[in-house]
Image (spheres, rainbow, N blue to C red):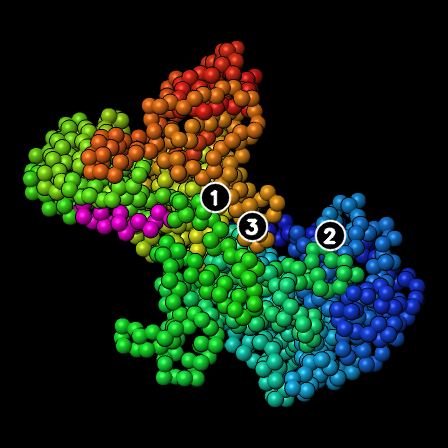
Amino acid sequence: MVPEANSMDLKVRELLKEVRIDSATSKTLDKAISSIVDAIRAIPERVVSSKGARKFIEDLRVPANKVRFTFKCPESVVVAGSHSVRSIARPDVNVDLLVRMPKECFHRNDYLNHRYHAKRCLYLRVIAKSLKSSPLVQTIGWSAFQNEARKPVLIVSLVHELSELHGCYIRIIPTATSMFDVSRLNLNRNNVREVSHDGISQPTPKYNSSILEDMFLEDNAEFVKKMFLEWSSLEEALVLIKVWARNRSSIYMHDCLNGYLISVIMAYLATRSGGNCINKSMNAMQIFRITLNFIATSSSWDKCLSLQSRGQSNLSQEDLNQYLQTFGIVLLDASGHLNLTFRMKRTAFSELQEEAAHTLKCIEKYRDGGFEEIFMTKVDFAAKFDSCLRVNLKECSTIYMPGFCLDDECWRTCEDKLHLILKQGLNDRVKLIRVTWRNAPLEWNIEDGISKFSEEPMLVGVLNSTHEKSFRVVDVGPSSEDKKEAVKFRKFWGEKAELRRFKDGAIAESTVWDCESWERHLIIKRITEYILCKHFLLSKEDIVHSVEQLDFCLHLDGKDPVAFSSNLLGAFETLSKRLRNLEEIPLRISSVQPLDPALRHTSIYPPVPHPLAFEKGVKPKPPKFATTCIQPLEVMIQLEGSGNWPLDNIAIEKTKSAFLLKIGESLQDKWGVICDATDDEVDVLMSGYAFRLKILHERGVNLLKNQGTNKMKNTSSIDKELFLRSQHSSMINGLHGRYPTYGPVVRLAKRWFYSHLFSSFLTEEAIELVVAYLFLNSFPFHAPSSRITGFLRFLRLLSDYDWTFSPMIVDINEDLTSDDVKEINENFMLSRKSYEENAQDVEPAMFLATTYDKASEAWTKYSPTKMVLKRLASYARSSADLLTTLILQGTSGPYRWECLFRTPFNNYDAVVLLHRDKLPYPHQVLFPTDMNQGKHVIWGNASNDFHAYISLGGSIKSLEDARDKLMINFDPTRCLLEDITKELPDTFEVWYDSLGGDAIGLTWKRSGSKKRVRDEADESSRGSIDIMKDVGEIGKGFIRSVYLLKAPRLQD
């Protein structure tokens, strides 16, 4: 434990060095602040009217004649916030300046009807105009204090010449110390006359708290400052918690946590009121853990917390109960008048508690304390929630009709209402619903008023429950005998409610969400659309879900081929039974195991039944056309044990071939299946699919395990490969059973890999293992329950993982012991010995270790190389950034969802375009490629030797004739690449899409050897255009065009 603790402490120290500002920068900042303060204090008196912010005041419904006053310079200007307690955490370098407005600027009744807020804005307006002439000021903007539109603040950006303060800004926040009689602002008072029900005035606790906050802001800032004075470990702990919270964007916002509240909670824990949980003998990480533990588990949150010393509170129990009833969470300041957490919602706090508890578990579980997961990983809205939707409420007049600001602002009221509606509609389908309208405009001009706050869409995050609950088709409501509840149910669901009799005889209200099996992941989307359209009078165009946006790349002809999975699995089961029942062969078949990705739910396009692949006598209704090619599904079989097998490897393979021929004959004779046999395998056509049989001989695996290094070179690796694939397939099948979302995420990941032409460099098994890793090691998240969230996390994992210095250990069944992990790490270190000599010559560059492959030899031993992996990480980073933007902000200009799967061809030296109608599966081409860059070297006509589709006349005879033309496992693209590599060796690195892309990327190979330099010189003398013509000649009849983008660069 000691080395692990030391590792964590070392990383924390380095993090603090990186995010905290040094003393020199702090001094420069102090000088800039001093100049700004002097400029504010020098502002002369002037008469102020509503003219400076007319629209803002109109939106607050304050009469213009009520806001006229004489501006006087502030009574005091003090530094508050992070800088005052030396806890600024980069990249947010900002300083809070508290500007105390003089009492003379206000009337004693200005706390009524937003008059205070109107004058507060005008006071800031004068300061903004005056600071524009300061030489230190770059720009002055407006923002909202804690996203509260009626409380604007000034954002003063400093000039770029202050290089140490690049990106720094100063927030100017007005305060109103001792401005009004606090008794006029207690919880029970109504101070906004429009807030009434049936003519009876209602209390305005949120509005009153908004003013009280300004009245006690200075006192509370001073309380925190005194607590942090000369307490370095407390300052460091505050920085750590801010870094932790900022990475979790859904809890670091207006209705949950901010830097100020964190400092208040820590200060509370250091007082007698907080039980002195924190003391000066503790280091930063100890304080970090204690604070998170208090947030996550303390029962004190169910009561009223208070910064007042014990015994000094003048509040009765009745007063405290009223606070708890009015606000979800209560933390009273030292005055006892203000609830510092009056904006915090109970749902947001519950999420905060869950995040804190989850982090504490990580510290206990992970070997190094989980530093990367806790402090470095972004847990933002897009990656955390299984479904994100943006709701456009700009035209929803019912929200704004009563007014933008009453007791609470209309946006906050709308958040609460929408959350309530979704919670009632989704019920136990979801674990968490997060509704937030972070709507302060990025560039807000106060003269535009606060109506601009409605232009940003509301963001909703949904965390799914279990797969069974989230995607069930029927919701059962109240019994028909419970009339009262039945009426409520029907009122809420409207036309979707129906009375049904269930299998157990019960009659109850219900809602049914009928859909195809491959569309069930959209059920939550359909429910949210229905209830939001019904209760908010929105159109479907106003509601944009992320969950379905990438489905297009998995569909063929508008349908997901996964719909045929039950047919495929049924066909495999039939084949398995038939094989195990064969008695005509010398040795019985003991096991049949699927090897193909389609049989473990990870194939991008699982095959659909082919009309020419049925048994004799089966007469399916033939379509007009069928594909000429059919992809075989590999199946491994094992025979019962026997001592009569030969010992020679070649003889073993010949014996296997004999068995396969006999198996094929038996299947054909007994069940009328069509078989096509070769020396290595038998292709069985039945039930619309082609199954390719291969035999695993256990002795072959044992030979590989037991022989020495010299004999190993002469041993066939067929059995070893089959053994590894069977182990992998079995584990992945089990993983998909635990995580039903795993399969769709893998399909998206593979589609992305192939779309960016990486098919040559990474096997399907490697992709499946990387995706498996993020499901098995999900912290700081929970395992994804939606394909788009899993895909985003996959892209981030691929781009951020430290492949050079860390092995990726994928322990699917938790079989690895500590000795196994030690062995893996030793193998990894052995593979990295060459790194110091040549950083580019590391094998394997992507070290993937599993229980069956502790040395990463199965899938990534030679590929990808270091350079390819670097390119892969770069593409993943770019795609992850784009996907995050699309989820949170939607499409913008040319950047659309399709861009995630469009590869930039300017990254290749040459591009070869193929005739699409000569591809084996033209319907799988995601985006047809057309080039408008580079030199068009050649173009060629299509050959008539191969056609992608066979015409089926409709008669049985025509089916028999067409079956002779069926080609199993034929791929002209693969043949072309083999020919290019053979005819032009060591010339190109070839990039292609094995799934059916119509473009091939070529990059010139570069080598440091003298021989290679001479070869390059020879090639250059021939001319790169001649080489491109050779490529065209090799693929004549299949290649449509060749474009040269960059000539080869010769090495010195």
For the residues labelled 1 and 2, the Cα–Cα distance comes to: 32 Å
Q: Identify the amino acid type marked 1.
A: Leu
Query: Is label 3 in contact with label 2 (beta carbons under 8 Å)?
Result: no
Would residue 831 be seen by someone viewing this image from the given angle?
Answer: no
Q: Mark 1 or mark 2: which comes first in sequence? A: 2
Residue 984 x %, y %: 42, 18
Residue placed under numbered mark 1 in the picture: 798
The amino acid pointed to by label 3 is Leu
In the picture, measured across the screen, residue 108 lies left or right of residue 382, that is right
Q: Determine the residue positioned at 36% across, 35% down.
A: 921
Residue 763's quadrant in the figure?
top left
Coordinates of residue 705 in the picture (x, y in percent):
23, 36
Relative depth, front residue between 426 and 989 = 426
* Residue placed under numbered mark 2 in the picture: 168
**x and y percent of residue 570 in the render?**
23, 50
Of marks 1 and 2, the one in the foreground: 1
Q: Nearer the viewer, residue 1033 or 252?
A: 1033
561 in magenta: yes
In the rendered structure, does residue 927 fall within the stretch colored magenta? no
**Quadrant of residue 893 in the image?**
top right
Residue 886's disc is: 3
- Give the spatial CA distance, label 3 vs label 1: 19 Å
Q: Residues within 10 Å of mark 2 (few under 14, many from 20)?
A: many
Closer mark to the observer between disc 3 and disc 2: 3
- Residue 196 in view in this figure: yes
**Lower position in the chain sequence, tag 3 or tag 1:** 1
Q: Quadrant of the N terminus?
A: bottom left
The segment highlighted magenta reads 560-576
Of marks 3 and 1, the one in the foreground? 3
